[in-house]
Amino acid sequence: MSAAQRGSQHDTDVLIRQVNNHLTTLRMTPGEHDVVLAELVAASLRALLLGTAHSSAADRARVRAGAHYFVLRRDTRHDRRQARSLVDDLRLVNRIARDLGRDDLVVTYDGLVTVSE
């Protein structure tokens, strides 16, 4: 494995840990978030991260941006910007999956919210 591949794998591992940590945080605040939806989005992101670990830099960058979008939520009390919903995260992750030809990772969700593209 080349140094570039090891670096890419390390970055993938770090982002997967961040996705998992964020999901754990969401699970610890029951009633505030749709945990089922968060788990579906996180699972799709993990698969996309693993699936593009050795892909082109452009594809890796798209997926990494989606992971950062999911992880870096703006929903703290001290942040004046409006929090994004998990449905927004779902739409972005689904768009990335479709653009990469990974329709198998597109999440369909029929919970309390309606997702329309």
Image (tube, rainbow, N blue to C red):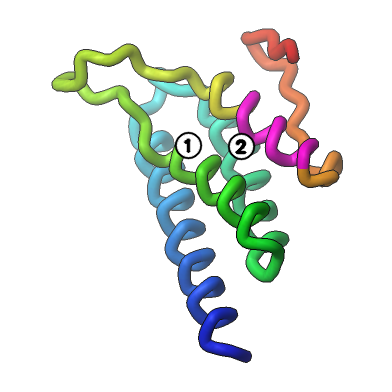
In this rendering, the label closer to the viewer, 2 or 1: 1
Q: Amino acid at mark 1?
A: Phe
Q: Main secondary structure of the magenta part?
A: helix
Q: The magenta stretch spans which residues? A: 91-99
Q: CA distance from mark 2 to mark 1?
A: 8 Å
Which residue was labeled with disc 2? Answer: 41
Residue 35, image x and y in percent? 52, 30
Q: Would you say 117 lies left or right of 34 here?
A: right
Compared to residue 9, the image places residue 69 above or below, namely: above
Instruction: Kindly identify which numbered label has been placed on residue 18.
Output: none
The quadrant in which the C terminus is found is top right
* Label 2 packing within 10 angstroms: few (<14), some (14-19), many (20+): many
- All told, the count of numbered labels is 2
Which residue was labeled with disc 1? Answer: 70
Residue sitting at x 63%, y 53%: 58
Q: Amino acid at mark 2?
A: Val
Please state which of residues 66 and 18 is positioned toward the viewer in this rendering. Answer: 66
Residue 88, image x and y in percent? 55, 21
Could you tell me which secondary element the residue under label 2 belongs to? helix
Compared to residue 117, the image places residue 42 above or below, namely: below
Q: Is residue 52 magenta?
A: no
- Of the two numbered discs 2 and 1 on the same chain, state the one appearing first in sequence: 2
Residue sitting at x 73%, y 11%: 116
Q: Image quadrant of residue 22?
A: top left
Residue 112, image x and y in percent? 63, 10
